[in-house]
Every structure is written in C-alpha cells, then in structure tokens.
Amino acid sequence: MSKLEAQWVSKIEYNSGGALLSWLPVTTLCRGRFILGITSKGLWARSTESVVQTVSDETLCVFFLPVLEELPEVVRCKMVDGLKGYGLSEEFVDLFPFEQVVLAGLRSRSEYWSVLALKWALFVSRSNSLEAELDALSKSGETQKIRHSARKIAKQMKVL
C-alpha cells in the first residue's frame, strides 16, 4: 500500500505516544463529521481533528459507531467511490469490520446505537456472534421496540 502513488497524509496515531501514521482519507460520513480512510498498512481508520484511529479490536469499534448513522448501501458506495479515486480496488471495503461495528452497537446498551445496529444486522454476514447478540437483545434489550426488532431480525436470519 505504501508504494501507492497518492498523497499520503501523516497524522498522529491514537494511543501511540505520538507516532505518525500514513493514511488516505477515503470518504466523509455523517454530514462531514466522520472521515473514514485506509492506512498504508491496509487498515481502516477514522480521523478526528488531531489523531487517526485504526480499527483493531472490538473495544475500539465503539469509535466507529457513527458509520451506522447512514444506510449500509450509502456507506458502501461512498467507500467504493473513495477507493476508486485513489485507484484502489473496491475489495478493500470487505476488509472493514462491519460486523464488529454492528456488534458494538448491539452491545452498547444505548437505544440510539442499538436501533441503528439492528437496521444494519441483515447487511453484515451472519455469524454465531451476531445471532447470539440478537438473541440476547431480544430478551434483555433496553426497550420493547428493541426486543421485538431483535427477535424479528433473528427470525429473518434463520430463514435466509
């Protein structure tokens, strides 16, 4: 990736003690509040004013929850368009951990993020973790609406 002929942006990596990270801003989401990009190592990352944060584990996926504020098709199209702008393959979209972000939303105990994550649940690949989280949410979700939605989506997943 680092050999790609593009204008790499250097920014401080989150929680790195000041180390610089090279990355390419790929797309802007959430009406300009959220910049999503890819690092020279091929990792997806988001930028704040001062740092770049990579997607590395589930605990950090909470920082990527704003992705859920837009429709899955819109996010995917924006990511593909941004990648193509750099001459990169749209296959890089598949490296983004959509499932982990959805799981973080479902586990958030926040009605706002849970509702958005439920809207994305059928978009991500079906997994045992996703099915288990939907089952748990259908029993102990924050609101009746969330419990019913989780139950409905879990049933739809079993049919598909």
Image: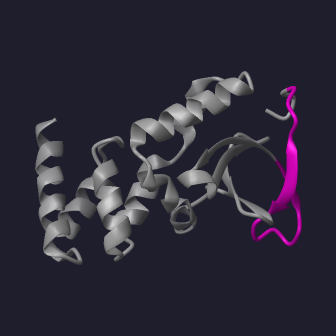
Magenta segment includes 9: yes
Q: Residue at x 56, y 35 (%)?
A: 78
Count the marks.
0
Image position of 118 with respect to 18: above or below: above
Of 73 and 56, the residue lying toward us: 73
Residue 79 appears in which quarter of the rendering?
A: top right
Figure check: 24 above or below 5: below
Let me know if residue 55 is in the magenta part.
Answer: no
Residue segment shown in magenta: 5-22
Task: Give left or right: position of 142 versus 108.
Answer: left
Residue 22 visible, this orientation: yes
Q: Is residue 81 left or right of residue 154?
A: right
Q: Position of residue 53 (x, y in %)?
A: 70, 60
Nearer to the camera, 109 or 40: 109
110 to 70, vertically: above or below: below
Name the residue at 18% across, 60% down: 150
Quarter of the view holding residue 84? top right
Residue 100 in view in this figure: no
Q: Quadrant of the N terminus?
A: top right
Q: Residue at x 41, y 42 (%)?
A: 72
Give the colour scheme shown. Answer: one colour
- Image position, residue 86 (x, y; %): 74, 27
Q: Please report the residue visible at 75 percent of the width from the left and 66 percent of the height from the top.
A: 14
Query: Percent from the top left, x then y, of residue 6?
Result: 85, 30
Residue 123 lies, in percent from the top left, at 33, 41
Side (left or right) of 153 relative to 116: left
Quarter placement of the C terminus: top left
